[in-house]
Image (tube, rainbow, N blue to C red):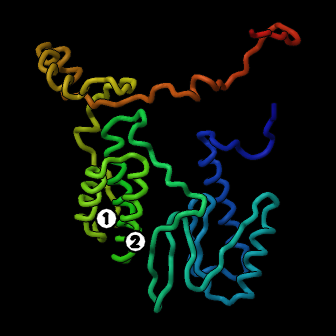
Amino acid sequence: MWLQVHGAAMGTCMAPSYANLFMGELEDKFLASAATKPKIWLRYIDDIFLIWTHGCSNLDTFIAHANNFHPSIKFSSTISSSHVPFLDVLISLSDGILHTDLYSKPTDTFNYFHWSSCHSYHTKKNIPYSLAFHLIRICSSEEDLKNRLHQLSLHLKTRGYPLRHIKSAIAKAKQIPRHSAMQKRNSVTTNKNERIPFVITYNPALPNVSSILKTYLTILHSSDRCKKAIPSLPVTAFRRPKNLKDVLVHSSTHHTNNIGFSLLGLV
């Protein structure tokens, strides 16, 4: 049994928020105290990308200042005049122009949901499209995009995805121009957000719940009281069923009054 007395435990819901708040205050104080500042400073939680235009010696001084600014925060750095990774993007400089490509860590196994996993059909069907759309946003070169989409197809085939779903998703994503894919989406309130969610635990043996709700909605609307409470078709929302981890692992320890242990012989 361990008691954590410093920092936040990994995996807790509030850990990313703690990290953002802490790093936000730390970087404000750090940049204000730096003698020489970077031209561009971008941060996502603990991953930082910066463009430096003040020479290598000043850069070494800047990194040393960063590593000595806080006793428990140390930065590892990747320095290059041609290319550098940031999150899942590889940024390269060629002829004074910045190019972007997909960056994957050497340890990445591309372990996407298997097609036979216990997830709803629409979830698994949308995964190839989401990944292909993500590549269109990242890859600035048509040749890089073509290679990455081919690699994506191979990874998804390895995970059991039907080839027709892969081809259909990639073709659908390629119809979207990159400049449109790069635009920030504005959240628009629609009547879908006002619909009541019908929450049910997912099971592969379930029938088409949405179709059943649509068929029998008229019965609900035959009552003025029910029609007022449920004016439109409810949104089907699946709750995750229990997995092996939920069954075998418990957050609380099991207390017993028995002292010591006993031996059980099996024949």
Instruction: Answer yes or no: is residue 48 visible.
Output: yes
Amino acid found under the numbered disc labelled 1: Ala
What residue is at 51 percent from the left and 64 percent from the top? 88
> Could you give the CA–CA distance between mark 2 and mark 1, rounded to whole angstroms?
11 Å
What residue is at 62 percent from the left and 80 percent from the top? 38
Q: Earlier in the sequence, mark 2 or mark 1?
A: 2
- Residue farthest to the front? 267
Amino acid found under the numbered disc labelled 2: Cys
In the image, residue 266 sits, relative to residue 253, either above or below, namely above
For residue 90, the mark is none
Query: 245 or 18, which lies in front?
Result: 245
Instruction: Say what secondary structure mark 2 lies in.
Output: loop
Residue 56's image quarter?
A: bottom right
The residue that disc 1 covers is 181
Q: Within 10 angstroms of label 1, few (less than 14), some, or many (20 or more) residues?
A: some
Query: Could you tell whether 214 is left or right of 15 in the image?
Result: left
Q: Quadrant of the N terminus?
A: top right
Residue 30 place in picture, x, y as percent: 71, 69
